Each structure stands twice: as structure tokens, then as C-alpha cells.
Image (cartoon, rainbow, N blue to C red):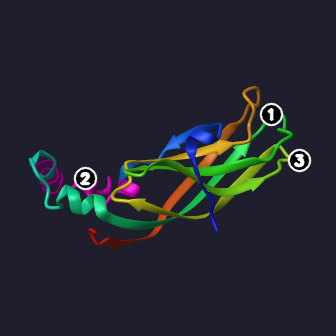
Amino acid sequence: MTRSVPSHLLKMRVLHEIPRHIYCSDMPDPVTMQDRNKRLSFLKFLRQTSHHTPARAQSLSKKDWMFNVALWLDFPTAPLKPVSLWLMCEDSKGQRAELIDEQLVGDATSLMLSGNVRIQSRGEIQALRIACAGLDDQDRFSVCEQHIKLIETSQEAMKAS
């Protein structure tokens, strides 16, 4: 079970902005952009004045997203406080963060934080970021590797009342 918190309540360090093609349905995969016809059809889609989904229907749709996230951190000196991994999501409801994992570094100089996280959004996700909390300003670290993968998505149209 993940915990959702408004992101302005936590002091987080944003580590990476997730590329839109991972979670956005109207963005093509970079591999498909190698094909000239698919690339041109996507550019035509972007130049359209109105897309097929009406703005009201898009804003009323509720979506569930499930992501698998992993992050490897190295520390020259281990922090004393627990370090937590968060996935920050921005949509029409605002910006909030979902807790993925939290661990105490202890005597080790490296740390792996990972887990699955479910995000409920109203409409499309506008921005998705990996962030870290529990670190002081003087704490130094490096990101060895990060991984994010969309596991599943589902959409439920909400009835206008």
C-alpha cells in the first residue's frame, strides 16, 4: 500500500523527470520514430487543432497507473536518517508524491530502493518525477542507476453529475 502526500509538504530532491513516452498514450516509442511514415503521422497528429478526445471527457476520466521503480544510490558517507524513494505525479488534481520505499543506510555506502506504486490520476499525467527524501543539504550522493517501467494502466470514465 502506498501513501500519497502533497509534494509541497516534503523536502524532496528531484532526481529525474520520467520521459513522457513511458506513461503517455499519445507519445510514440522512440524506436518507432525511426520509421519515417510513423514519424510523419505523429507530427501531423501534433499539428491538428483539435484532438479526438474532448477536453471535458478527458478531465472527467479517472486513470490508474502501476509502475515498477528501482533506484541505486552511492554515498561517500552514510546519512544518519532513513532515505525514502518517492514518485511525484502532476495531473489536473495537482502535484502529489507516492511513497515507494524507505530504508536506513546504516554502515553501508550504497542503497537500493525499489517497489511497485499505484497512482490514481484525473485525466492524463502531466509530469512524473523520481525524487528522494530524508537527505540533508550537506548529504552527498550519486545515482548509480534508475529504472522505471509502466506495468499496467486502466481507465474508468466518471459520470458527470
Q: How many marks?
A: 3
Q: Are marks 2 and 3 in contact (CB under 8 Å)?
A: no
Residue drawn at the location 84% of the way across and 34% of the way down: 77
Nearer the viewer's eye, disc 2 or disc 1? 1
Residue type for callout 3: Gly
* Quarter holding residue 63: bottom left
Mark 2 and mark 3: Cα distance apart in space: 45 Å
Mark 2 and mark 1: Cα distance apart in space: 40 Å
Report the quarter where the N terminus lies: bottom right
Q: Which residues are magenta?
A: 21-44
Residue underneath mark 2: 33
Nearer the viewer's eye, disc 1 or disc 3? 3
* Quarter holding residue 54: bottom left
Residue underneath mark 3: 106
Looking at the image, tell me whether mark 2 or mark 3 is earlier in sequence order.
Answer: 2
Left or right relative to 10: residue 16: left
Residue type for callout 2: Met
Mark 1 and mark 3: Cα distance apart in space: 13 Å
> Does the segment drawn in magenta span residue 24?
yes
Q: Position of residue 6 (x, y in %)?
A: 56, 47
Residue furthest out toward the top: 138
Which is more toward the observer, 58 or 36? 58
Residue underneath mark 1: 76
Residue type for callout 1: Pro
Looking at the image, tell me whether mark 2 or mark 1 is earlier in sequence order.
Answer: 2
